[in-house]
Image (tube, rainbow, N blue to C red):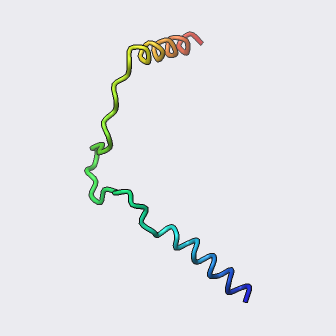
């Protein structure tokens, strides 16, 4: 009986991965073409922070 319960529980866990999660996924992909959402442009403060970080890393 315990073995049957464990088998049923294991099957339920494995089959849970097959459920639709509701997120639309592309079926056909174009090779080399990014089809995700467009990036948001960086603010001037973010650009300055990245420039400072790269300048600091170049010295080390």
In this orientation, which residue lies closer to the viewer: 2 or 53? 2
x then y, percent, for residue 44 = 38, 14
Q: Nearer the viewer, residue 4 or 31?
A: 4
Q: Position of residue 11 (x, y in %)?
A: 58, 78
Residue 27 falls in which quadrant of the image?
A: bottom left
Q: Residue furthest right?
A: 2
Residue at the image point whose x is 71% and y is 85% from the top: 3
Residue shown at 27% from the left, 44% from the top: 33
Q: Residue at x 52, y 15 (%)?
A: 53
The quadrant of the image that shows the C terminus is top right
Q: Nearer the viewer, residue 54 or 38?
A: 38
Q: Is residue 5 above or below residue 60?
A: below
Residue furthest bottom as drawn: 1
Left or right: residue 25 versus residue 17 is left
* Rendered position, 2 above or below 54: below
State the count of labels: 0
Image quadrant holding the N terminus, namely: bottom right
Above or below, 59 against 27 in this view is above
Where residue 24 appears, as percent x and y from the top left, is 34, 57
- Asked whether, in this view, residue 24 is left or right of residue 6, the answer is left
In the image: residue 44, left or right of residue 33: right
Q: Residue furthest front?
A: 22
Residue 18 image point, x, y percent: 46, 70
Return the residue nearer the eye: 19 or 32: 19
């Amino acid at each position: 009986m315990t073995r049957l319960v464990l088998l049923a529980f294991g099957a339920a866990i494995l089959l849970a991965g097959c459920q639709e999660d509701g997120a639309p996924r592309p079926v056909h992909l174009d090779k080399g073409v990014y089809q995700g959402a467009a990036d948001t442009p960086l603010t001037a403060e973010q650009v300055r922070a990245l420039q400072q970080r790269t300048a600091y890393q170049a010295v080390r």
